[in-house]
Amino acid sequence: MLDTVFIYSYGNVMKKELPAKYYLAHFRELIEFVTSKCMHLLEPKHSEFINKINQLDEQSQCMLARVYSRKPYLVQAQSLTYEEITSPHQAIYTLKKAGILFEPNEQHYSQLLAHLTKPALLELLSNYPDQISYKKSAAKGALVDSAREFFKSCPHELAPLYSQYVINNRSDYYEYFEFLFAGKLSSGDVNHQNRFVMRDLGLTATREGHSESLSRFETLDEAQSNYLLNRYRLAFKNITDESDYVALASQVLVQAAHGAIAVALKNKLLVQLFKQLKNTNSELAFSLLEGCVDDSEAHEIQIREQYRLGNKQWVKARLEAIIENPLTDDLLYFADDFLMRKFNKQTRSRLSTMLADTQCVLEIDELYRGEVEQGVNDYYTGQGMQVFNTENTLWQSLFGLVFWHELFIDTPYPPCNEFDIYPQVLRLGNFYAAQPAQINERLAQCQTPQALLKLVCKNAAQYFDQPNGLFKWHNELLQPLEALILNSPIEALITHLTNMSKHYLQLKDGYPDLMVIHNGKVHFEEVKAPGDKLRRNQLTTIDNLKSSGFEVHIAVVKWFIDPNRIYSVVDLETTGALKGGNKITEIGLVKVQHGKVIDTWTTLVNPQRHIPGFITSLTGISDSMVSNAPVFADIVKPLMAKLAGSIFVAHNVNFDYGFIKKECEMAKVPFKMPKLCTVVESRKAFAGLKSYSLGNLSKHFNLNLTSHHRALADATATAQLLLLIQQAPIAHR
C-alpha cells in the first residue's frame, strides 16, 4: 500500500500519497552519500555493514529500510507488511542470515516485557495464576514490574515470544550514517526520514540549487567525538533516575572533543550536569566545570560558587585575570560588575546603573498589560513618530543581506547538503577570522546610506524566499531596514556590522524591542514593564549599539488608566465558527469615548463561499446580499484606520478578534490590538446573572438590540453594555 500523509493548512486537509518504495529510495540515498563522501569517517565495522547491504536483494533492502524507520527497539515481525514487499518473511529471513537483523533472546526479556501492550501482558501473566500476584486493573507499569520480577529467574519461558520480534538495531551503524548526513541526532522521530518527508511535502525549507552533498567532518576523530557527544546529549534529556547523572558525567568528562562544535557541545553538557549534581556530589560537580574549555558560563558559575564557599582571594584573582584578558564581552561585564560590588563595595550593579542612566519613564494605559511593547509602540505612534517592532529580526536581516555572498556563496565553509540553511561559519564563530579581506571589502562598498540600501535591496530581490537560518522572509522586510539605513549615521551602521562580523555569537540577540524614527533620526527602545529586569545579553548588545554611535533608551513603563481611551466595539457575522475555513459576512463597529458614541461604521463582506442555510436563517444574510459586497482585502485598510489607536471590544472578544486576525494574515496586513471582552467584564460587574449572552443581557438591561445577529445592531447593544459596565461600582468590577 502507498503511504498516505495528511497536511493541515488554514483549516483545510490535503492528502498526499508517497511512493511504495519511498523509504528504500532514501535509504539508498543515504548509503550512497556515506560511500561517496564519508569513507574517511568510517571504521572497518561500518564498511563491512555497507558491503552486506549492497549484497542484499531489493526486497530485503526494502525491509531493512522499513525496520529502521520504526522507533521501538523491538519490532513485531507480523507488523512488517508492506505493499512493496511481496514476501516479508523471506526478506526477514535473508536479513537474519546475512547477520544484519537479529531476534531478541533471554538477555532482552526486560525490554520485551516493556514492549508488550497491556492486554498482551495480562494474557501472558494469566498463564501463571499461582506464581504471580497482580491486579487486572493495575497500570501497565505495575504489570511490567511484576512480570520482570518473575521472569528474571526464568527468561527462557519467554522463548515463544522472542521469535515473534526482530531487534531494531539502527543505532549500531545506521544512526551514525544519519549523523554524518545531518550533523545532529534527534530524540524524536527518525531525523533522516523525517527531513526528506518534510522536504518532499514542501513543509520544510531546503537550499535551492544545491547539487552536491559534502562531508561535514574532516577526520574520524572529529566525527566520532561529535557523534558520541550527541548521544550523551540525548541520554541527558532522557534520564529518569537521578543516579544516572553520575555515570553520564564521568563519561562526558573523559570524552575527547575535536573541533569547535564538539567543544561547545561538551561545555554545554558539563554545565548542565554540574547543575544536576552540585547539591548531591559537589566534588564531581566542580570537576565538571574545570573540564570546560573557554566557556563563559562555566567561568561565571565557578566564581559565584567559590565566592559562596568563602574562597574570596581565589575569586578576586580570577576576576582580575578575566578583566585583563576577557573571553567575551559578556564575561567581562560580569567580572567587572562582580569585582566592583563584592570587593569595592559599589552598591549598584552595572545593569542597575544602565537602567537608571538610560531609562525614560512612560505612562502607558494598563489595558496593555501583557502587550507592553505594543503599548509603547502606540504611545509613540500617537505622537506622530514612526515605530517598528524590531528586536533581533532587524539586525539579523541587515547582517544577512549585507553579507549574503560571504555567508552563503563565497564561503570557505559551504553547506554540506540541501538541509543546511544556517551558515556553518557562524556556528563555528569565526566569520571575520575566516575571510577578513572579503568582509572589509564588502563594507567599503557601503560607505553611504544609498550604497548600503542598494546592496540590501539587490540581495533581497535576488535571493527572496531562499532559506537562510537567520531571518524569515516577508513582504514588509525592507521597510524597517530602509528606515534604519536612511535615518542612522552611516558610520554607526558600518561599525556595528563590523562588530557583528567579528563577534556574531555575542551580538546575535539581546537587541531593543522597538526602533523609533523622530525628525529624521533613529533611536531604539528596550521596553521594561514593572518588575522586568535587564538581562546580561541585552547589556552587551545595548552597550555595543551605544559605542557604535546609536541612541538607546530603556523605556520603563508605569501603568495608569487613560481617561481618553477610545473603544472600538466590534461585531461580526460569519459563515460559521472560526475553524473550518469560515469567513466574515458583515462587520459592525461602534466607537465610544468619554461615555459617548463618536462614530459608527458597517459593511457587508463577500466571503467568497456559500453561506449555509442555518446561518442565513439566523442572521438574515444570504448569498445574494453579499454577491456584490467587497471582499475583506478591499476593506481591510479602512477597517484598520477605524480601529487605529483604540481598544478592541467585543462580546466574546476572541471570536471576533480571531476572525479579523485570520483575515488580516491572509491579506498580509499586520493586526495587533489591546482587547476587552464584555462577557468577562459583565461577569465581574454583574455577578450572579443566569446568562451572559448578549440577547439575555439586552433583555435584562433593556438594551437597544433592534435586530439581533446583524453586526451593527449587536455592536450598538454591546457598546451600551460597555457603558453600563463602566458605570458599575468599582468594588464590583
Image: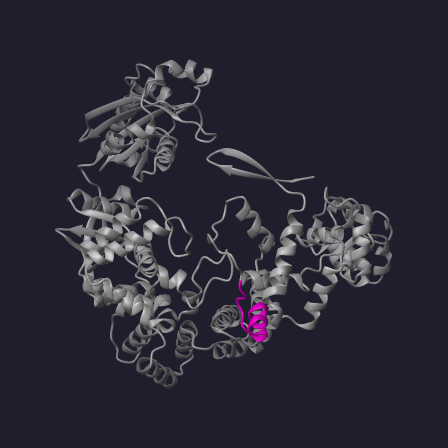
Camera-side residue of 121 and 389: 389
Q: What is the count of numbered marks?
A: 0
x%, y% of residue 593? 19, 31
Q: Where's the N terminus, which quadrant?
A: top right
**Highlighted range, magenta:** 214-228
The quadrant in which residue 488 appears is bottom left
Horizontal side, residue 90 vs residue 566: left or right? right
Q: Position of residue 688 (x, y in %)?
A: 38, 28
Q: Could you tell me which residue is drawn at 72 percent across and 64 percent down?
A: 51
Name the side, left or right, on which 615 lies relative to 156.
left
Vertical order, 610 against 279 (above or below): above
Of residues 609 and 645, the one drawn nearer to the viewer in this rendering: 609
Q: Quadrant of the C terminus?
A: top left
Residue 367 falls left or right of residue 63: left
- Residue 334 image point, x, y percent: 33, 73
Residue 240: x, y in percent?
A: 61, 61
Above-or-below relation of 722 to 410: above
Q: Is residue 352 visible?
A: no
The coloring applied to the image is one colour
Residue 710 visible to an observer of this rendering: yes
Front-most of 376 and 189? 189
Q: Does residue 233 belong to the magenta stretch?
A: no
Residue drawn where x is 22% and y is 54% of the image: 484
